[in-house]
Image (tube, grey):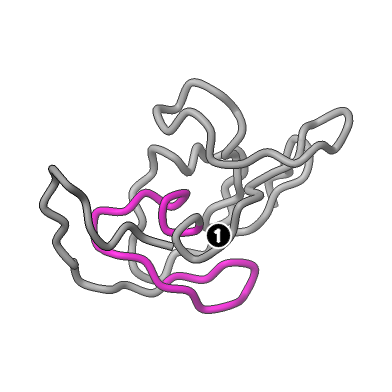
Amino acid sequence: MRIKEHPILELIDKEKIHFFYNGEVMYGQVGDSIAAALHASGIKVLSKSIHLERPRGFYCAIGNCSSCHMTVDGIPNVKTCITELLPGMRVEFQSGKGVLR
């Protein structure tokens, strides 16, 4: 879901780019963070807490919390709220601490 109209801001449609989320093709816009593109695509749970497996979503959007940690292109614990979406990225849901391959 994206905001279509805003009373103050001018919203501009940007170029669409594709990426993969858990193997499924999804689309975001140039300039999106990974978390913003996922949220706009309807993905609300980005990770789960380490100990109690509670769902975590798009929270601070400035890289201060650990709610958006995901595995990106094989690298675990990437803060997706501050990582720019690039064409062809492979983003995977991460539960717990994440493991390097």
Does residue 31 sit above or below 69 in this rendering? below
* Foreground residue among 9 and 101: 9
Picture coordinates of residue 83, whole percent (x, y): 39, 43
Q: What SS does tag 1 mark?
A: strand
Does residue 60 sit above or below 38 in this rendering? above
Drawn side of residue 87 relative to residue 68, left or right: left
Picture coordinates of residue 57, whole percent (x, y): 61, 41
The image quadrant that residue 11 belongs to is bottom left
Classify mark 1: residues with Cα within 10 Å, few (<14), some (14-19) or many (20+): many
In the image, farthest residue toward the front: 7
Quarter holding the N terminus is bottom left
The image quadrant that residue 63 belongs to is top left
Picture coordinates of residue 46, whole percent (x, y): 63, 48
Drawn side of residue 30 relative to residue 53, left or right: left
Q: In the rendered structure, which segment of residues is drawn in magenta?
A: 19-38
Drawn side of residue 21 relative to residue 37, left or right: right
Q: Which residue is mark 1?
A: 91
Amino acid at dot 1: Val
Residue depicted at x 62% and y 75%: 23
Picture coordinates of residue 85, whole percent (x, y): 36, 56
Residue depicted at x 17% and y 47%: 7
Q: Is residue 33 magenta?
A: yes
Residue depicted at x 48% and y 21%: 64
In the image, farthest residue toward the bottom: 25
Drawn side of residue 9 relative to residue 34, left or right: left
Residue depicted at x 75% and y 41%: 55
